[in-house]
Image: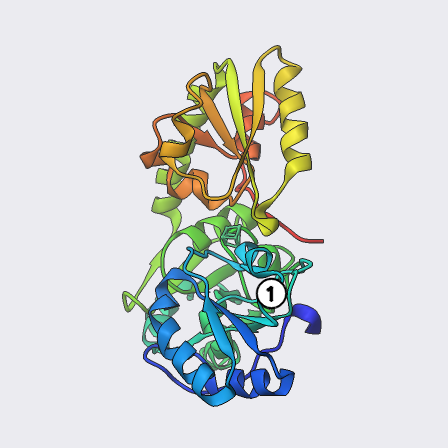
Amino acid sequence: MEDRGKNPMGTKMLNYQLKEEEVVAEIQELNAQMVGLQFPDGLRVHATGLARKIEKETGATTLISGDSCYGACDLSDRSMEGLVDVLIHWGHTALPLDYRVPVLFVEAYSTMEVFGSVKKALKFIEDYETIGLVTTTQHLHLLDDLAKYLEENGKKVQMGVGKGTLRGQVLGCNFSSASGLRADAFLYIGSGNFHPLGLKLSTNKPVIIADPYMNEARIIDEFTDRILRKRFAKITLSAGAKSFGIIVSSKEGQMRLEMAKSLKKLIQDQDREAYLILLDNIRPDLLMAFRDSDVFVVTACPRIAIDDDQIYEKPLITPYELEIALGIRDWEDYQLDEIIYE
Ligand code: SF4
């Protein structure tokens, strides 16, 4: 999908390739005078260094977004509309959204060594013939080498292109690159447990993690069981709720107003109350005013209800979890919420 943004290749800076030479060349070619810069939280420490280089070498003025950014669902294009000629966004790949300003996506590949953890993962996949290979944006450039390594170790490797994601890429809310594959098991390259959890629940196949940050390999089963127990406790609490706050995100890539409206109707059909609440960033202090709501249903980023539930006083649940709480979806049909772009 070439309209997903240009992906210049390039130079190395600390743990990431930030491709500054290519970014400078692109700004010069566009003759941009005002340039927006946006980073995920972990990369924003590079902002002023990159701004200095861009201003010196192109003569453009830069405008750095200081807000948190968690994905391409959360671009500064709306706040920078009319202010910049181009927005440079590091760290994520484009989603099929109508961005309001021209956006140059810079994938910011990690330079971390990953093969040590993949080698450790071999013992976990020895019983499986065909392996589905997936990772997050920062390791995408290694997929072909990783596939070759697995093939040299006797495996057949499958990688899929998702809806709104690149070959082998998963997001925290989108596992579509894996769901069509006929793999015996999946090998996830990356840190954390959330992506493998989603992969497990979405494919129902064994999932092995090769984690280069911990230099270890592990399986996701125990973590999955722990999370499911917690989620079922939240669903049980929600089943008796009388009033629901349904959170709608104002971020373009997380906005699911039509879904929120249909959830409101499902709730009202059972003679219970439901209100739609529009939020940009979702925080416990912002929900405190809604004292009447027993439960909050999050139609924004699916990670919020799962990752952050312990910091909220009231239960936060996903749309699928609401359906189980209302008795219109079976417990056996539990699945993680995804935002899939058609
Ligand atoms: S909705 Fe959440 S998981 Fe999906 S891309 Fe945005 S921040 Fe990531």
Which image quadrant for residue 27? bottom right
Q: Is residue 2 left or right of residue 220?
A: right
Question: Is the residue 241 above or below the residue 85 in the image?
Answer: above
Q: Position of residue 4 (x, y in %)?
A: 65, 69
Residue named by callout 1: 94
Under 8 Å from ligand 1: the CB of mark 1?
no
Crowding near the residue tagged with mark 1, few <14, some 14–19, many ≥20 C-alpha atoms within 10 Å: many
The N terminus sits in image quarter: bottom right
Q: Residue at x 36, y 82 (%)?
A: 13
Camera sees residue 154: no
Amino acid type, callout 1 = Ala
Q: Is residue 106 left or right of residue 209?
A: right
Q: Position of residue 145 (x, y in %)?
A: 48, 82
Camera sees residue 57: yes
Which image quadrant for residue 284? top left
Of 318 and 328, nearer the camera is: 318
Of 62 and 11, nearer the camera is: 62
Q: Position of residue 185 (x, y in %)?
A: 50, 59
Q: Position of residue 172 (x, y in %)?
A: 49, 53
Q: Is residue 133 left or right of residue 216?
A: right
Of 88 and 18, nearer the camera is: 88
Q: Is residue 96 left or right of residue 128?
A: right
